[in-house]
Image (tube, grey):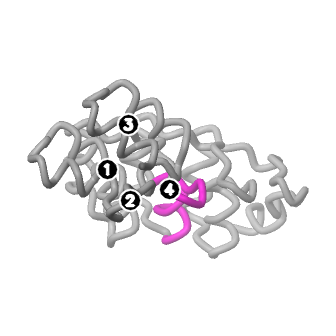
């Protein structure tokens, strides 16, 4: 039985919260029957667990969608973690920055998103915005404290000349 599933069946909410915060793959752990913690929560109508296990995914999806600010606010209002990470270490801010969703970026930052958080390969939202050519998003991130000279794990600098040419 997977870690997140085990904690779910014993209804240890704090343990599930800890696992979700510290292990991106924990919510994808499966039982011998192939069920995830989300599946078990749904089967048992444990809505408090269902929300905890699902809200992060909904927030990531909303951050990627055409500036779906209302969906983002809804997820955050229900308790989704603004800095939750997916299986690749991307936060909702990484997704919004990469897709050029300026309004989503602003809402996420206003709700406490960390502008210099790195994903699993060391990219910040600013790296992704610049790489994808979303200069208005890059400027917004910098205006909120994102560091243009932060190196990724690949030891690459955010191309400051690109940012200066805006």
Q: Which mark is residue 53?
A: none
Q: What is the C-alpha distance between the residues marked 1 and 2?
A: 12 Å
Residue at 55% of width from left, 43% of height from top? 23
Residue at 80% of width from left, 47% of height from top? 150
Give 149 or 88, whichever is nearer the viewer. Answer: 88
Residue identifier under label 1? 37
- Name which of mark 4 and mark 2 comes first in the sequence: 2
Q: Position of residue 154 (x, y in %)?
A: 86, 60
Q: What is the C-alpha distance between the residues marked 4 and 3?
A: 18 Å
Is 48 on the left-hand or right-hand side of 14?
left
How many discs mark residues in the rendered view? 4
Local packing at callout 4 (Cα closer than 10 Å; few below 14, some 14-19, many 20+) is some
Which of discs 1 and 2 lies nearer the camera? The answer is 2
Give 133 or 118, whichever is nearer the viewer. Answer: 118
Magenta run includes residue 94? yes
Q: What is the C-alpha distance between the residues marked 4 and 1?
A: 16 Å
């Amino acid at each position: 039985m997977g870690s997140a599933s085990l904690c779910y069946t014993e209804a240890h909410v704090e343990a599930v919260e800890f696992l979700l915060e510290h292990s991106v793959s924990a919510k994808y752990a499966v039982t011998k029957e192939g069920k995830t913690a989300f599946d078990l929560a749904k089967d048992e109508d444990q809505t408090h667990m269902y929300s905890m296990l699902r809200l992060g995914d909904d927030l990531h999806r909303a951050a990627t969608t055409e500036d779906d600010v209302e969906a983002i606010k809804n997820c955050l209002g229900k308790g989704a973690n603004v800095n939750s990470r997916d299986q690749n270490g991307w936060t909702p801010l990484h997704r919004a920055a990469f897709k050029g969703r300026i309004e989503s970026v602003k809402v996420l930052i206003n709700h406490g998103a960390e502008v210099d958080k790195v994903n699993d390969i060391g990219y910040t939202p600013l790296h992704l915005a610049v790489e994808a050519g979303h200069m208005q998003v890059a400027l917004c991130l910098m205006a909120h404290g994102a560091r243009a000279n932060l190196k990724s794990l690949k030891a690459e600098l955010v191309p400051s000349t690109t940012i200066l040419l805006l």
